[in-house]
Image (spheres, grey):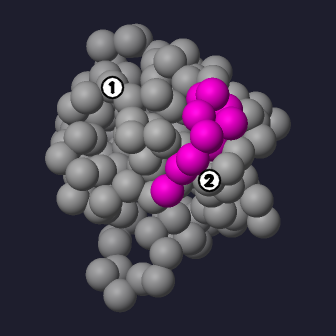
Amino acid sequence: MAKKSRKGGQGTPATVALESAAVAFTVHAYEHDPAAASYGGEAAEALGVAPERVFKTLVADVDGALTVGVVPVAGQLDLKALAAAVGGKRAAMADPAAAERSSGYVLGGISPLGQRRALRTVVDEAALGHPTVYVSAGRRGLEVELAPADLIALTGAVTAPIARA
């Protein structure tokens, strides 16, 4: 993954942020099925990638502040662990409309990169066990592959064990 590559997609705020930061990444497009039960699971299957390497971006409300959790699609976000990771007490999933407004993306296409408003972000520590991970590129049917260290640096994230099976 030495150079940037675009496969089947025009720029999104996420890819623009990656290009501006001059980090190596690859965009992977697939045909999104509106009937898919899981956006992340669909991405892993369509791209032929292990679900442990595909991460979903979830927006939660931690003590009144929107916070992003990035976890493998094979697991679930542990809200208590997310709250603890940012020094909070209580967390609940954010209102979908608030998540869309804050991020500038639609559900199923929320990327941790290039969000309209930068939010506190926590990436599950499992990401560090892979040379590259996949996250939404800002649109359903579009994923970006990048090094976990670049994801963490560009989002200003902390890492913590925030996923559960």
Q: Position of residue 21 (x, y in %)?
A: 38, 12
Is residue 71 shown above or below 1?
below
Residue type (three-letter) at the residue carrying disc 2:
Leu
Look at the image and tell me in which quarter the N terminus lies.
top right
SS class, disc 2: helix
For the point 36% across and 62% down, which residue is it?
108
For the point 33% across and 25% down, which residue is it?
118
Instruction: List the residue tagged with mark 2.
Output: 79
**In whole angstroms, how far apart are the C-alphas of marks 2 and 1?**
20 Å
Which residue range is magenta in the image?
82-92
Asked whether residue 54 appears in the rendered view, the answer is yes
Residue type (three-letter) at the residue carrying disc 1:
Ala
Please tell me which residue lies in front, 78 or 27: 78
Is residue 135 shown above or below 30?
above
When asked about the image quadrant of residue 114, the answer is: top left
126 with respect to 27 (left or right): right
- The mark nearer the N terminus, 2 or 1, is 2
Is residue 153 shown above or below 161?
above
Look at the image and tell me in which quarter the C terminus lies.
bottom right
Q: Residues within 10 Å of mark 1 (few under 14, many from 20)?
A: some
For the point 67% across and 50% down, which residue is it?
80
Q: Say the numbered circle drawn on residue 118.
A: 1
